[in-house]
Image (cartoon, coloured by chain):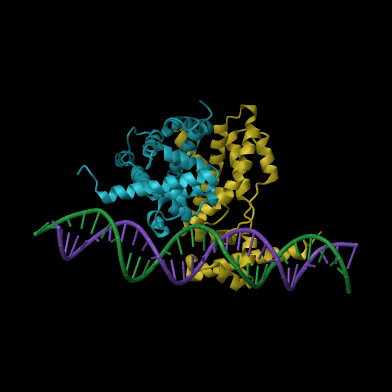
Chain colours: A yellow, B cyan, C green, D purple
Amino acid sequence: METEGLRARKKRARLEAFVDATHRLAAEQGLDRVTVEAICAEVGVSVRTFFNYFESKDDAVLGMEHWRLDEAAAEAFATGGPTGDLLADMQALTTSALDHPPLGKERMERAFELAKGHPELMLRAYTHVQGLHDEIGALVRRRLGTAADESAVALIGTLLLGLAHATFVRWDTAGGTGDVQDHLPSVVADLTAIFAPRT
Amino acid sequence: METEGLRARKKRARLEAFVDATHRLAAEQGLDRVTVEAICAEVGVSVRTFFNYFESKDDAVLGMEHWRLDEAAAEAFATGGPTGDLLADMQALTTSALDHPPLGKERMERAFELAKGHPELMLRAYTHVQGLHDEIGALVRRRLGTAADESAVALIGTLLLGLAHATFVRWDTAGGTGDVQDHLPSVVADLTAIFAPRT
DNA sequence: TGCAATAATTCAGGACGTGCAAGAAGTCGT
DNA sequence: ACGACTTCTTGCACGTCCTGAATTATTGCA
């Protein structure tokens, strides 16, 4: 199957049309002045269809569908790899997650730009990422084995999400060029400096 | 002025009435089935009045008004105190912040209980806390002085919020008894173990 | 082509949240 | 206690988001 079917292609095209139309209108007149109705008029479909694609207006701005962890990376982490050092492996897992922006870099960049002026969007993104929380929790639990202390699991899960977030912010304040995951090491370095000041 | 005026007392009473009614109804029939209209019927005021007290329905669940940092603790942190060690002082600041729940412990506990089944609430709380973000940023910047690297400021600010959040979760998983801030040391200890595994 | 699955549309409606202007209730000076 | 002043409450109209159910169009496949 080289072609993935007309149905799937149309679906994806329409999804991108929604996202692009939203971004275009938001750039023109500001996000709060953009109604779902206007977006749909731009795309040429009914409002109800919009909500078949997205759960909320915000999701259209973010271009959110499903953000999954990379299978291989997740499995490696759960089984104690790839290096065996918890911190290093957390970095590896985070890197792999940041490596797959669902709809391309330019769209993600525009979405993030809009999100800076609209905190609700950042939060909406968080709920999506939070969807990964259970999955992450399961991974951490497998990795820690029987010694799994629930509060430690929760902490590590939160920390993983926090690492991703901080890395994202740092990438953005650095100008938003290059790969997001390149900024992870410096985040970890700063945190290490805080928690282990004696070199 | 011993009495703070009838106006202020009535306002506070009504605010608590809103929160309590919301909690009671939510416990009975589930939060999503509770409409603002129902809450107002319970309290005996108009819907419009509800929105004079809260910006959103979620805020009524959380009983949110303004959550301010303690003046003295903030000042101490900004000027390099109280101990001089960044990590210890972050703990002190976080502790003082967790020490002042606006509407009493029982209400906070019920709100948190509800929030566990409704992630949006946790996020809404986050926006409120986020209001502290700028304030915290300013503190961190003052403390770091001219050497203030913006990305470090952002990281430390996020970390402070993260500490508070993790502490809160840990307090809850421990049964939700006692003082929230008592769990902060163990959070810090776990993080230290992760970032500085060689003792 | 013709049948089954899937997606889009129409329609009706609930719920949240806001602006506005009129009226009620608290506050204060005298 | 009275009237002027401020603040709060209320009703109403409206816009927007989002959902469910039933209907119609489109696509996949034999």
In the picture as drawn, the residue positioned furthest to the top comes out as B199
> Which is nearer the eye, B39 or A183?
B39
**x 26%, y 49%: residue:** B6
Residue situated in front as seen by the camera: A9 or D14: D14
Q: In the rendering, at what x and y percent does residue A139 appear?
A: 64, 38
Q: Residue at x 59, y 39 (%)?
A: A90
Q: How many marks?
A: 0
**Residue A40, position in %: x, y?**
60, 70
A59 in relation to A78, above or below: below
> Percent x, y for residue A199?
46, 31
Residue B152 is at least partly visible in this image: no
Which residue is located at x 36 percent, y 46 percent?
B141
D7 or B198: nearer the eye?
D7
Say whether residue B104 is left or right of residue A164.
left
Left or right? Give the position of B127 relative to C5.
left
Residue B91: image location, x then y, percent: 40, 35
A178 or A49: nearer the eye? A49
Is A59 on the left-hand or right-hand side of D28? Answer: left
Residue B104 vertical position relative to residue C14 in the rendered view, above or below: above
Is any atom of residue B70 visible in this view? yes
Residue in the picture at 64% in, 71% down: A45
Quadrant into which the N terminus of chain A falls: bottom right
